[in-house]
Image (tube, rainbow, N blue to C red):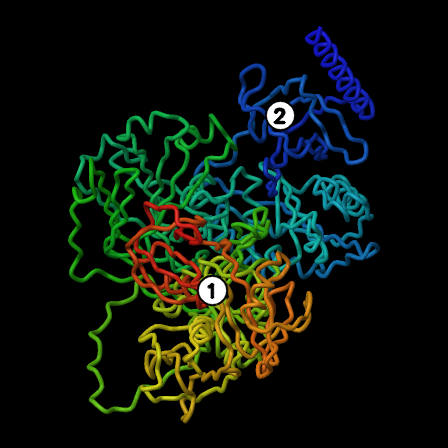
Amino acid sequence: MKKRLLLLFIAIVITFVVAADVVRCQQQSTRRVRGQLLYLTVSEPAGQWLIRDNDLGLTPLSSGYNPPKIDVNGTSVLPGSAVSLECFIDETTGVCNPNGLAPIFVTSRPPIAAVAPDTIISQNLLVMILDYADCGYPASLGEDDVRSIYLGPNRDGNGGIAQKYAHCSYGKFTINVATFKALLLQPRCTTPVTASCAPWAIAAIADAAAKARIGIASFASFSHVTYVLPPGFSGNSGCPWAGLATLPGTQSWMQTNFYGINRWATVMQEALHNYGLWHSWRNGVEYGDESSAMGRGIACPNAVEISRMGWAKPIIVNTATELDGSMMDSGALLSFDVPATYLKINGSRNYVRVLPNWLVGFYNNPAMAKNLYISVRVAKNGDVDLGPEFASKVNVHEVNATVDNGYPHSLPNEECKIQFLGSVGINSRLDLNSYKLVIFAGDWVANDIMRVHICRYQTTASECRQPTPSSNPPLPPPPTLRQPSPKPPSFSPPPKSPPFPRPSSPPPRPPPPSPPSPPPNSPPPLKRSPPPRSPPPRRPPPPSPPPPNSPPPPFQNAGYPLGCFADDDTRKIPNFLGSNLPMTLALCASLAKQAGYVIYGVQYGGQCFGGTDISKATSLGPSGNCNMDCTGDSSQKCGGGWANNVYTLTCPPVPGYAAVADVNHLDPSDDIKCDDGTMTNAETAAIRCSSDINCQAFNIYATGVSSIRGSSCTKRASTPSTSSLGVCLYTKILTSCNLITGYTLTPGADHPGGDNVCLTASSLKIAARYCSSSSTCKGFNVFNLSSKSLTFCSKIVTGPLSNAAGVCYYTKINTSCPEVPGYNLAADQDHAGDSLYCDSLSLTDAIGRCTYNDKCLGISTWWNVTNGALQACIKSATYPTTATPGTCFYAKL
């Protein structure tokens, strides 16, 4: 009986659900949609697909819908295929909700892209500048502004984006100057446009306005169309991207912002999406390749991409266009003279294509097999802003072999997942262990032509002998340094990683802008910089040391380090100061000082930003991505993708301490702990001093000073003081505060407001016990220290703190582990042993020390609950880990 009742209940529920679904579907019209299947390069978990009809109208498929790999007839469903699909159409949004019971049909395969070598593509481009002033979104660009952006200052194609296209493609991908048109339009405002930022709605209304203005025939004469949104749209939650495009197709959308139309690499990325190129990856992160405009780079496309566009061809190996196991004996070197990809020589044969079919099980698996592309990049011409990680080096990318080997005929427009693997500089080697392959970067044999040696091995790379370098290899001349442009170049930082936007790919956070931008959903992210020399001339022997007792050498005060902090497309240090010069910390400091800023940040190897707000500059928390050498000094770090190395030109404020600039206390008998030869930031020095009741003061040194004048020390006294340029001396405001277990102490500081309750207590332990028993208490202050009865206020927030005479502030220790970009976090884990260095350090300082130590692979941190100081160890190994409650373990990516 119970079983029958259960079956009856299930039947009723099914009937109700089906009936409800029928009612819902009856509220939508059913229609068979036919047209070309396109992918919209927007950041959606499952992507966004569209169907374009013969009139170029776009019907969006519901978010989250992914077409099947094959249709009912076994035909591959690819971007660009002509398809037929039955949909329930939402009459409000125009979105097609595919009928799951009705299959998709492929009626014709995608057209083969124009990839034949030496094919010339000349775009007839219409750029529509959209002005929605009637609904509060006015355009900021005029038609002539856009002509200048695309065609250069003379509007002749010898500058601007057109010139970048020509440089990157060796003249094979261009904008037709004669037919190029910029059109300022005032299309009508609609909810899908202004509230949802729906690209298909923007295009439909703009197309109608353009046809009304120039005529249907004239509109049809353009091969490609770009829609430029007004500046206010970049803050719209519906369009957090810098640019996007249809793949394949003829349409792209650009934001009017730093990472959008003003960044040539973002514009190029969107343009190449129209020809079937996808984003470029690194370490499993989309947009992560900073060597290419198709990732977060401000550089020409990489070797795989210029191959797929038909701009370049592989170097001939005997008579073949690829190198495979049949041509490579294990342990034997094969050598190639590889020209930099910017050079148009040898018929643009400028990369080696490798098919690692000696890995039989791997290469015979269609899902796993990869091909390799090996090229040389130099920061000249279209690659002039190539970052130092890639410039004057061999670059290696991998690509899905199944898609690559069939291109362009069997799987046109299918993503082949291009991924950057690594780079290697002159007379060094790169071991690709997973491919059992070693790549040696040899000498420069002519201007920007490098001899590259390739060797496969059976077990270890030691089977491949190191080639003997030439005694006097010719050196390519260094590139001419460019003067900074009047307007900031568009970079990309990109996301993003990322948590930032990226251009259709987002650009770069700086990075800066990865991206087209971090980021833009465009970025984030980005970069930029003056080209490193390719390679530098051999250095003369170092000069003899100065005679004893000689005065210390001069130094340049580059400011006081705060650490590496994450950035995003809103720019936490907002004022761009330059990127086209060989960047150093001293140069960026000088630019910031001249502009009246008190803080500066360097990003992506060569971007310089200035600002005034330390709390904003550090608001996104520490990052582990400041690993790029400064383009003007490889011994310094200048941030990374969407990550700033932040410095202040004045003594950084430290709650609870009074700071005096350019003075020091030099009595060694008063020194408690000194970091000899190590750059200590104020945060770490304050942790050490506040957790030591004997400490009365500490000093820190400006960048460029400590290596010459001395080291940071905690001190028992701060007097007498003496003049010492580039040193900040901090004196503890209140010396009578005691430590309490489970809390960090900030003497002489308080947080105004945030009081939960104020009470009196007979001892510090009782005040602490009260806070510890309350889940809402984050800390407490104590004053009336000289009284027998203490007064304390429990706090529901932890800060910010400011100086307050006569107050001791205690912050409850929070043992949770913050995420840090650039590291994998394992909470309550540690790796025993292999510590390079352990001490009381701020997390930001620990990250910085790991960045500067090539042996550092990770960091572990934990709290000393007795004195309230954070402890950290710099690790040379990260495996295996063991369960260690209360420890945060960070493995460097």
Residue 807 picture location, percent across and down: 59, 78
Do the residues under discs 2 and 1 have CB atoms within 8 angstroms?
A: no
SS assignment at label 1: strand
Mark positioned earlier in the residue sequence (2 or 1): 2
The local crowd at label 2, few if under 14, some if 14 to 19, many if 20 or more residues have their Cα within 10 Å, is many
The N terminus lies in quadrant: top right
Residue 250, located in which quarter of the rendered image?
A: top right
Q: Residue at x 39, y 84 (%)?
A: 716
Q: Quadrant of residue 263?
A: bottom right
CA distance separating discs 2 and 1? 49 Å
Name the side, left or right, on which 838 lies relative to 36: left
Is residue 597 found left or right of 848 in the rendered image? right
Residue 767, horizontal then vertical, whole percent: 59, 68
Against 797, is 45 above or below?
A: above
Frontmost residue, 40 versus 24: 24
In this rendering, the label closer to the viewer, 2 or 1: 1
Q: Is residue 50 left or right of residue 598?
A: right
Q: Which residue was labeled with disc 2?
A: 82
Q: Which mark is residue 351?
A: none
Residue 48 as seen in the image, left or right of residue 170: right
In this view, the residue in front, 691 or 594, is 691
Q: Say if 392 sits above or below 680 in the image.
A: above
Classify mark 2: helix, strand or loop. Answer: strand
Total residue callouts: 2
Q: Which residue is mark 1?
A: 564
Q: Nearer the viewer, residue 249 or 730?
A: 730
The image position of residue 547, as x and y in percent, is 20, 88
The answer to whether residue 675 is above or below residue 143 is below
| Along the viewing direction, whichever of 863 and 298 lies nearer the viewer | 863
What amino acid is at disc 2? Ala
